[in-house]
Image (spheres, helix red, strand yellow):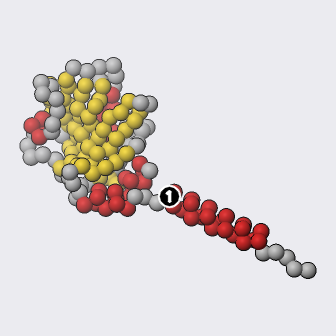
Amino acid sequence: MHRSKGPVVALVGVLAFLVVAVGCGQDVDSEVVADLERSGLALHLPEIRGEVPVAVKLVEGSEVVLSYDDDGYVYTVSEQRAPDGALCRGIAYEEGSDCSESAGVMRADFEEMSVVAVSRGDTVLVARGLVTEADATLVDDVVAALTDAPEVSARDLVEAVS
């Protein structure tokens, strides 16, 4: 009696497809990893109120921007070279803001919005788009997250976002 090899070949083909499909789903974007590595920045992965970034990109070759989405509330954290001198002079924020700085932490408030920056060696992490008027603890939570954020490789950062 001669058996057909069709079902076995089909099963092997399906398994091979699944292995490739699952494996490809785990790949990180090597181009983004290379861009982040070229930035020369010490990269960090802030987890803010249990949220990790939903996107990461390199802007103008020297600033890494992490985007967060907390139930439709979107804000960013940028990682950039620390400015020379005071953070209130070296970090961009809304004109007319009240800016204060202490122990490597900057806060600039304008109406209901705040910008927070934390110096981490040669890198400064800057959170923008923080609506603080309705959330009294947001700035403290963001400062803690930026201060405690672990330093990570470019690959680990991209994997966390993927």
Measuring 34% from the left and 41% from the top, which residue is drawn there?
67
Q: Amino acid at mark 1?
A: Gln
Q: Is residue 95 visible?
A: yes
Identify the residue under disc 1: 26
Towards the viewer: 53 or 19? 19
* Percent of width and height locating residue 123: 21, 49
Q: Secondary structure at mark 1?
A: loop
* Percent of width and height locating residue 30: 37, 61
- Left or right: 123, with 1 as reference point: left
The correct choice, above or below, for 154 with respect to 54 in the image is below
Measuring 30% from the left and 38% from the top, which residue is drawn there?
76
Towards the viewer: 5 or 105? 5
Where the N terminus falls, by quadrant?
bottom right
Pick out the residue farthest to the bottom: 1
Measuring 46% from the left and 60% from the top, which residue is drawn there?
27
Pick out the residue farthest to the right: 1
The correct choice, above or below, for 61 with respect to 128 in the image is below
- Left or right: 106, with 17 as reference point: left
The correct choice, above or below, for 1 with respect to 56 in the image is below
Q: Is residue 153 visible?
A: no
Measuring 37% from the left and 38% from the top, which residue is drawn there?
68
Disc tally is 1
* Percent of width and height locating residue 113: 25, 25
The residue carrying pointer 1 sits among few (fewer than 14), some (14 to 19) or many (20 or more) residues within 10 Å by Cα, namely: few
Quadrant assignment, res 92? top left
* Percent of width and height locating residue 9: 72, 72
Towards the viewer: 31 or 91? 31
Towards the viewer: 13 or 56? 13
